């Protein structure tokens, strides 16, 4: 079952013409009297890489946590495209409204949030990678196989039996990405994934993010940097005073540096498909 | 000084020769306290966990209540239970007074506030990201709670140790609801109080040694665990 999911994940990437994976309508979030978020409309699509920019304290992390279902919101609705049965999905393409949970935690299916400094449990790297699979009550043998693939995928086989708390920041980020990868997420919410990293760690982490994007995972990358790495990005959203402002494609292209385009082209074929590793 | 040395040697002799009366007291003590701590701990940690994660009206009142109950003397708990369980009390028909279950009930009431307060401190000291990570990776509330408990295991172990130390050494409640009946409800602290009042110091010192060794052993164990935790 899991291997089928992995094979599906390398199928052609959905475009913005498809129905959105996640729809947000009229979302508000307040801390006391202070309004943090006031978002009329936001649609996120599978296979799209979105940059969420904004100043420190603008509410980017809060928004991402709300989208992941781990933070409450005050008003509004979030809709997640139902995909429990993929055959049915092709016929009906309907939305599953999960605001019936009364604006409380609305845990998503296939949406994973990664903290700026990822939290790894005080167990081995291997057990960290298996955590989500255990939650799915997968057979141990199958878990072990997928964890091994994840170790290969992230290039961290040599750390498999180390306690995860002993790793460096860059290694932790890569393990956290691999831990999300094993769950085959539809949408990955990355909170400043390369902040405070040295060049090498930043490149290694960016490489893994590109691999996720190229295998069809929708990614939202949050950053407060004014000149983000646009090599990864399809779409830019800016959060200012709680409102979301979308940059046009032209604006995005203008900010792209020619050097970046040539050094790391954003073509899906440019990265070795993940399928080869499976 | 000479008397003290001689009495201590007599106490050691009682311990190593397996004095029936002495070991019966030790058995009753461990039997009641272990049952009490095993019953109180899961409930207390569940309450701590809910108080640390959930936000609901009255949360601060409950936290304040448990913190306040920390300061209630054990003899007051004993008095309250005595009134409730005595023949003329509302639960008199249960005939629990001067029985082991009554002592266990008293020890649970004494341990619970300490376990809740220290458990809450441990959970609140945990990294918020731990909870969010478990949930975003698909863990249900129970698995997420167990994961979080593992992450704060040293704090919880310290809470359990402190609570156990409190109930095995308390004398007021055990005396009032247990009645200090040999082989049934006589525990180490109540026996020490009784034997000392009778001038039988040897048994008192022997039982004191057991309590002291237990306290030192438990704290040493927690220190080793904490040390292991710090290595990572």
Image (cartoon, coloured by chain):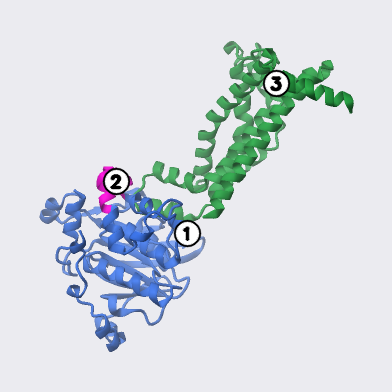
The residue that label 3 is drawn on is: B15
Say what secondary structure mark 2 lies in.
Answer: loop
Secondary structure of the residue carrying tag 1 is helix
Q: Residues within 10 Å of mark 1 (few under 14, many from 20)?
A: some
Residue occupied by mark 1 = A166
Magenta region, residue range:
A133-146
Label 3 chain ID: B
Work out whether A13 lies above or below B207.
below
Q: Quadrant of the N terminus of chain B?
A: top right
Secondary structure, magenta segment, majority class: helix
Chain of the residue under the numbered disc 2 shown in the image: A
Residue B142 image point, x, y percent = 40, 41
Disc 1 to disc 3, C-alpha distance: 46 Å
Q: Is residue A75 magenta?
A: no
N-terminal of the two: label 2 or label 1?
2
The image's mark for residue A136 is: 2
Asked whether the beta carbons under mark 3 and mark 2 sit within 8 Å of each other, the answer is no
- What is the spatial separation of the Cα atoms under label 3 and label 2, in whole angstroms? 53 Å
């Amino acid at each position: 079952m899991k291997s089928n999911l992995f094979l599906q994940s390398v199928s052609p990437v959905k475009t913005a013409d498809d129905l959105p994976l996640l729809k947000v309508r009229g979302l508000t979030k307040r801390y006391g009297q202070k309004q943090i978020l006031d978002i009329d409309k936001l649609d996120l699509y599978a296979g799209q890489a979105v940059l969420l920019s904004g100043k420190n304290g603008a509410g980017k992390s809060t928004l991402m946590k709300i989208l992941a279902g781990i933070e409450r919101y005050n008003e509004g609705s979030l809709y997640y495209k139902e995909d429990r049965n993929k055959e049915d999905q092709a016929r009906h393409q309907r939305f599953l409204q999960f605001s019936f949970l009364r604006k409380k935690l609305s845990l998503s299916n296939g949406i994973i949030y990664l903290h700026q400094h990822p939290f790894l449990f005080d167990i081995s790297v291997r057990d960290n990678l298996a955590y989500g699979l255990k939650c799915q009550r997968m057979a141990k043998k199958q878990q072990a196989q997928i964890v091994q693939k994840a170790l290969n995928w992230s290039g961290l086989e040599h750390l498999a039996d180390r306690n995860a708390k002993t790793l460096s920041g860059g290694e932790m980020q890569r393990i956290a990405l691999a831990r999300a990868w094993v769950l085959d997420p539809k949408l990955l919410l990355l909170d400043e994934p390369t902040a405070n990293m040295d060049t090498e760690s930043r490149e290694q982490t960016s490489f893994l993010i590109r691999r996720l994007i190229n295998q069809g995972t929708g990614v939202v990358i949050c950053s407060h940097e004014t000149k983000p790495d646009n090599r990864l990005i399809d779409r830019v959203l800016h959060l200012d005073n709680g409102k979301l402002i979308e940059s046009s494609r032209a604006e995005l292209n203008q900010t792209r540096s020619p050097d970046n385009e040539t050094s790391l082209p954003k073509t899906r074929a440019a990265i070795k498909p993940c399928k080869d590793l499976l | 000084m000479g008397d003290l040395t001689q009495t201590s040697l007599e106490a050691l002799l009682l311990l190593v020769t397996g004095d029936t009366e002495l070991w019966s007291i030790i058995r009753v003590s461990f039997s009641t306290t272990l049952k009490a701590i095993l019953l109180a701990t899961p409930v207390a940690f569940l309450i701590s966990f809910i108080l640390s994660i959930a936000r609901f009206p009255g949360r601060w009142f409950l936290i304040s209540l448990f913190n306040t109950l920390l300061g209630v003397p054990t003899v007051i708990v004993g008095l309250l239970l005595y009134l409730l369980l005595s023949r003329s009390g509302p639960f008199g028909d249960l005939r629990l007074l001067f029985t082991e279950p009554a002592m266990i009930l008293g020890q649970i009431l004494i341990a619970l506030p300490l376990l809740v307060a220290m458990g809450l401190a441990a959970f609140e000291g945990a990294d918020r990201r731990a909870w969010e990570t478990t949930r975003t990776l698909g863990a249900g509330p129970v698995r997420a709670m167990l994961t979080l408990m593992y992450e704060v295991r040293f704090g919880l172990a310290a809470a359990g140790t402190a609570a156990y130390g409190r109930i095995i050494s308390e004398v007021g409640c055990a005396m009032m609801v247990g009645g200090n009946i040999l082989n049934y409800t006589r525990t180490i602290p109540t026996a020490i109080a009784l034997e000392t009042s009778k001038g039988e110091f040897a048994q008192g010192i022997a039982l004191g040694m057991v309590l002291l060794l237990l306290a030192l052993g438990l704290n040493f164990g927690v220190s080793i665990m904490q040390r292991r935790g710090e290595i990572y």
